[in-house]
Image: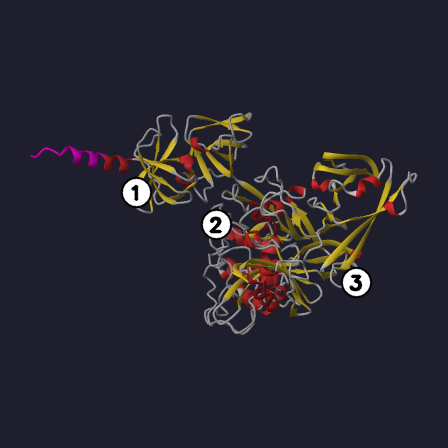
Amino acid sequence: MKKLNFEVFLVLLLILFLLSSPTLGAGMASIREDGARLREIPSQDGAVVSTLPINSPVELLKEGEDESGRVWFLVETQSGERGWIASWLLSFGDLKWVVVSEELVNVREGPGIENPLVSQVSRDTVLYLEGEGQDSEGQTWYKVSSGEGIEGWIASWLTRPGRVSEPPPVPVEIETEKGVVVLYDIYYHWGKEEIVSQVKSGLVTGYPDGTFRPDQKITRAEFYSLIIRLKSLPLEPDSPQAFQDLPPTHWAFPYISAALKAGYLGLPPFPLNFEPDSPITRKEIAQAGVRASGWESVALSRAHARPSFGDALTYPFAPYIQVAEECGLIRGYPDGTFRPDEGATRAEALTVLERMKNPPSPGTIYLAQQKIALSSTKTVTVDYAVVDLSYPNIKPRVFIAKDQVGRLESLESLASRNKVTVAVPAAYFDKKSSDPLNPDGPFRYIWGNLENDGTFITLTNQGTSIGFTEDNQVFFAPLEVGITGRILPENLDGRTQEDLSFYVSGLNQPLLPDSVRIFTPIFGNSVNVGEAKAVVFRQYRVVEIKSGEVEIPRDGFVLAAPAGSWLYAHFRVGDRVELQYKYTHNVTGELLPWHTVRTTASAGPRLLKGGKIALNQAEEKFDGSLLAESARRTAIGLSGSKTIILANVMEPVKLDELALIMMNLGCIEAVNLDGGASTGLFYRGKVINEPRGSLTNILAFTEF
């Protein structure tokens, strides 16, 4: 007999080891950190096989431990590479359970060893995963709980994925009119509250074995029968047969017939078969929920609706999914998808039914998308939000980054912290630092008229301004705001009446030759006027006249003019002043009723006026070369008298093309807003289109 070759022996030994070790089957995970190292052995001392990019998928083959008892996994990449990777470098996606992998592990109040100890758990304890966080060193921790009252944070590297172990059954007792129902598989489920509510109401019950099976798919017949029972509609057992595969003898026939009569199945013609025993899809339960809630007309009015899920754009379901999302009937997954064609589970169906009991009305702001042909060879996709100003709960607002002029903030941060429904960039701003002493610094002057709650933030009298009154009337005009001041002295002190008048040429703008500026607290804590002099006011009374760095009082403002200006000789400490605003058309000079406006944003040039293209850059003080440029664009338009359109075009277009786009969207008035790298759109907590950088200001609409 031949001796066994040593290399063959090693291979057989490895196969035996793999076969005898616990395996994970075909479990999947993804890489959570860029450059994660795949190693030959389960140890940080192991040779590196390769590095893997963030979010790349791997198949879990086997579980192991390093010399410290920390969990590692043998994985296979999509390219066929195999190696070991630390568990804390993996994201398990839909992971719901973790199992303690060391003898005794601390559970803490927060993610990190510096947090107080709340309890300890032993090896093989199964814990429900509620969330993730990081400690001060960037290491991943899990927020966990158990049926035994344990709640807190545990280091991820001291656990293994819970797919390898069944969760411990925890009984949930539900009192109903017919007695107590005990379910053993919903304690940790995300839909527990909705399931308990519906079981308590008698709409559903569990299975004889004490399970509810919340993640089991629900059939079309089951779902529609539940809607009919929820709405307490009469059954229709004597209705004509509408579907070949649903005879009157089928248990669900009277329920489906009732749903058909009530309009929950939509309008004829129908397919020949109903497929009552097939799983109902998520898009269909969204559609049925909207119809049964009485919002069919709202969905039908939104032919171009775009849900904020990237995979839910298919007509005719998209408007229903969007309305269902706005009303809170149904939500998407953490990865931003909706999975419209996926079969709905029992828990998902019951959640929709539970929310149908007392849902909010559909939003008065919605998202849409259209493809618009600009020529025989050029078609562009337009993302836009529709804002119905006829509803009194809609409020236009202007917000600036970090609540100070000239600061920078991401669109997501700026919109989210101000709790807006929809937002786009508004006025232009310096793309480079406006601080000559710090050219790489963060300060960016805003170029445009911005007003919030009747108080102007900036004034430059350039471009076209859009104004909104308290009752949401809308004005478009090349607005010029003149600020005239008058000194009210305690005594003339050698001054004439002519010396007591002055004119302000800008608000929170750079100090230029022959300019007179006002700086308010929203500009910051101070302003550096250099060699010029500044008149400091508190409660409209002069308290100081000085140069250099000047503090801006919280209850006042600073008036500044270049060095050598005659203005300073006219002020004395103790003088009071009054300011008056005059609103005029910057070309015709006619007075404008802007004193009724509460919110103003400006950019330009104007695109449409009275339904016709109205590009006139010179009139609005813009460079004429602007017409020839192609760029990503943002625009605001008015359709009718009360419907605002906020549009994004992410493909480069010229301004005359943007005007055609807004005309195609039904606008009669339209203005170009800050675009290019600033182009972006925020809608209901999500950035639909991401700007390439931070912004200084946004125009937003809120629902309250």
Viewer-closest of 236 and 192: 192
Q: Characterize the magenta stretch by its predominant secondary structure.
A: helix
Mark 3 vs 2: CB contact within 8 A = no
Please tell me whether residue 74 belongs to the stretch shown in magenta.
no
Q: Badge 2 local density, few (<14 within 10 Å), some, or many (20+)?
A: some
> Would you name the residue on which mark 2 appears?
215
Q: Position of residue 679 (x, y in %)?
A: 57, 54
Q: Is residue 142 above or below residue 331?
A: above
Q: Report the mark closest to the observer, 2 or 1.
A: 1
Would residue 508 be found to the left or right of residue 48 on screen?
right
Of the numbered discs in the image, which one, if any, rests on residue 590?
Answer: 3
**Rounded to the nearest whole Å, what is the CA distance between mark 1 and mark 3?**
75 Å
Residue pictured at 61% horizontal, 43% vertical: 408
Question: Image quadrant for the N terminus?
Answer: top left
Q: Position of residue 659 (x, y in %)?
A: 60, 66
Q: Position of residue 254 (x, y in %)?
A: 55, 66
For badge 2, the amino acid type reads: Asp
Q: Secondary structure at mark 3?
A: loop
> Would you name the residue on which mark 1 appears?
81
Q: Secondary structure at mark 2?
A: loop
Seen as rendered, the residue at the extreme right is 491
Residue pictured at 80% horizontal, 40% vertical: 568
Residue 560 lies in quadrant = top right
Q: Position of residue 124 (x, y in %)?
A: 42, 31
Magenta range? 1-13
Q: How many numbered discs?
A: 3
Residue 264 lies in quadrant = bottom right
Q: Is residue 692 above or below residue 40?
A: below
Residue 70 lies in quadrant = top left
Q: Secondary structure at mark 1?
A: loop
Q: Is residue 137 above or below residue 349?
A: above
